[in-house]
Image (cartoon, rainbow, N blue to C red):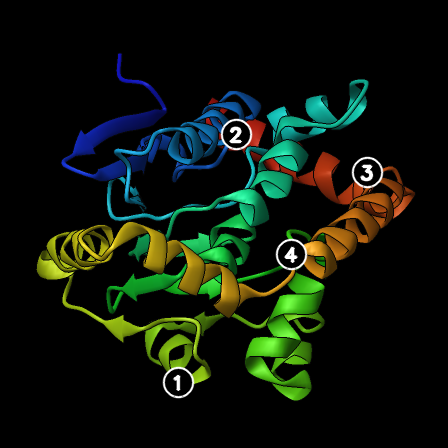
Amino acid sequence: MSEPIEKRRDGAILHLVLARPEKKNAITGAMYQALTEALGEANRDDAIGAVLISGKGGVFCAGNDIGDFLAAQAGQGASPGALFIQALPLLEKPLVAAVEGPAIGIGTTLCFHCDLVYAAPSARFQMPFVDLALVPEAASSLLVPQRFGMAKASEALLLAEPFDATEAHRLGLVNAVIETEALYEHALAKAKALAAKPRRALLAARKLLRGDPSAVQARMAEELVAFGEAVRSPEARAIFQAFLQKKARREQC
């Protein structure tokens, strides 16, 4: 049985694959932990020049695994998802994403922390936090307005309207729309191009481009407090309970 996070090296590239296609690559706590550890490895290992993340089975990521997510929220201390989110602004190496199919919730907000994002025509992005009686996460309440402008950010975060690869490119989330059969090789080539640059200059330039991460970290902290309150609300509990009941009925059929 394969690991739900496949990790492999291709020269100076650390490639992370969300490999749970039977669940549309919905992320569990164990997967978040593996991703967080991989980002730490990338920071520590001087031989790693860039990180590439993709999904298996024609899907990038359907968001959180709801059952696992609810169990994590009931535990003590920071959840594995929260620890992964907090690790994103601490990543020192370039992060590249290859996105095809659904990219829901964290599948979209993760992309705002990437240096380069390439999408297949099948890519569909959505941040349905409010629809789940939750609030935005991963500093998306800060980063989405910065990238999209307030009007489009309101459509994406308040109305939770989905948008396709072409619109993501127009809005500046995606660098290019690449045909599916060429997507991975294109993203890998771009990651390798980054890793081949003079390392010190590349990392210094990236740090200057991103600026002080404290604003992102502060917004993440605010969101996590609000998220914790929201997930315990009667609205959210009712929505998640209905989702789990519907899932159980499907599995019985």
Point 40% across, 37% down: residue: 25
Mark 3 vs mark 2, CA separation in Å:
23 Å
Specify whether 185 is left or right of 215.
left
Q: Is residue 26 above or below residue 152?
A: above
**Residue where numbered disc 3 is placed:** 237
Regarding residue 197, the answer to whether it shows in the image is yes
Crowdedness of circle 2 by 10 Å Cα count: few (<14), some, many (20+)? many
Q: Which residue is mark 4?
A: 213
The one of 183 and 214 positioned closer to us in this rendering: 214
**Which label's residue is closer to the chain start, 2 or 1?**
2
- Characterize the local packing of mark 4: few (<14), some (14-19) or many (20 or more) Cα atoms within 10 angstroms: few
Q: Position of residue 53 (x, y in %)?
A: 33, 44
Query: Residue tagged by mark 1?
Result: 170
Image coordinates of residue 101 in percent, x first then y, are 32, 56
Residue at mark 1 to residue at mark 3: CA–CA distance = 36 Å
Q: Earlier in the sequence, mark 2 or mark 4?
A: 2
Secondary structure of residue under mark 4: loop
**Residue denoted by label 2:** 32
Q: Is residue 180 left or right of residue 53?
A: left
Q: Is residue 119 above or below residue 63?
A: below
Measure the alpha-carbon separation of dots 4 and 1. 26 Å
| Circles 4 and 3: CB atoms closer than 8 Å | no
